[in-house]
Image (spheres, rainbow, N blue to C red):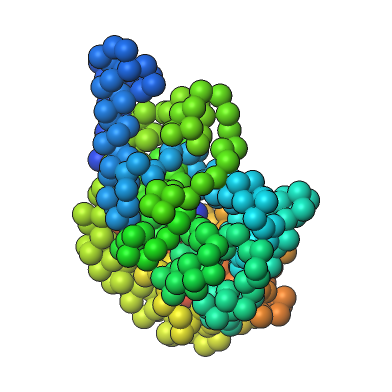
Amino acid sequence: MEPVYLDYASTTPVDERVARRMADCLTRDGLFANPASRTHAPGRAAADAVEQAREQVAASIGGDPRGVVFTSGATEADNLALKGVAAFQRDRGRHIVTAANEHKAVLDVCRALEFDGVEVTRVQPEADGRVTPEAVEAALRPDTVLVSVMHANNETGTINDIGAIARVVRGHGARFHVDAAQTGARLEVDVDALDLDLVSLSAHKTYGPKGVGALWVRRRPRVRLIPQMHGGGHEHGLRAGTLATHQVVGMGEAFALARAERDNDRAHADDLRRRLFAWLDTLEGVRDNGAGAERLPWTRNLAFAGVEGEALAAALADRVAIATGSACTSASTEPSYVLRAMGQPTDLAAEAVRVSWGRMTGTEEMEHAARTLVDTVNRLRHGAAVA
């Protein structure tokens, strides 16, 4: 039996309906042409497919399609947002506010900007992982030009009140960027109602392909930023490079499906979570990191007293695929910086694993995985060999 895949927060499988739409864009009898080649019919057909995808992505977050800038993924979108705004606002201010438990795609960009003279304040989250509007407001300065706070944390699933944070930031006059890679179209987000300025999105966290994402940029009032890639003026002059039609179309289809099936997906995720915790409740010494905060229905960060997370993941590797943190830090043996930012000591943070599931996870799979997880924890606690 193949391992039960419970690492959806790292990447989701591509939905078969998405894969079929992508395949139609690859061969001679499909939409293979360069979408920038609008002087002929094949190029215009590819361009039309790209624009349809742009509308699908925008519709899923309630935004203006003209604000969607396709990128190679959420990491590039984060880079464009932070570096682009910092460069454009250079003469107005050189201060950025973010959170200590942000994704590395934001934290590493902030670190790079510090070498360029930008000052960065990293707000500490609450013990449950939330970044509060009050903490953000306390960090604002007259020279603050940008605030970057993620919608939902990639390790704990904790959801931030980005609407309340947006009101604080808007009142100050700074720009507000949200990394929504973990939510995308899977949670209801209305960028206009929430008054967001910039939103990073990822296809491969939403049953789409790897290698494509987007940055949504508000047009009214217009958010200005300096492009970080040059060479052709693609994507409204904000991101140069020939668009990969098949990937863009895949992202559009994935986001349209996620929007249409949002309620069903959530109900399925809730059911799987209940099945998982019915088994976990039979164990002593289980910590649900982030408990008390609103969280994604498909992600939990768990720790089992007396069992190291790395040991547990290794013992389960051939039967249940889980993670000890975000995929971008999986090569590190250090305990999660996200949990340490939440105030957990190193020894407790080292016990944590992340379990995440989704649309393709079957109920029998979850039952088998939960039973296997409980059995493995018990064996590790008692020093027994793990089968």
Q: Is residue 384 visible?
A: no
Quarter of the figure with residue 76 = top right
Quarter of the figure with residue 145 = bottom right
Instruction: Residue at 37%, 16% (x, y): give it.
Output: 37
> Residue 298: x percent and y percent?
39, 66
Q: Observer-nearest residue: 42 or 10?
A: 42
Q: Indicate whether 248 appears above or below 175.
A: above
Is 45 on the left or on the right of 237, as rendered?
left
Is 165 on the left or on the right of 363, as rendered?
right
Q: Indicate whether 36 appears above or below 282.
A: above
User: Across the whole image, how many numbered discs are drawn on residues?
Assistant: 0
Q: Is residue 335 visible?
A: yes
Q: Observer-nearest residue: 299 or 183?
A: 183
Instruction: Residue at 48%, 50% (x, y): give it.
Output: 223
> Residue 224: x percent and y percent?
51, 46
Is 263 on the left or on the right of 351, as rendered?
left
Is 123 on the left or on the right of 317, as rendered?
right
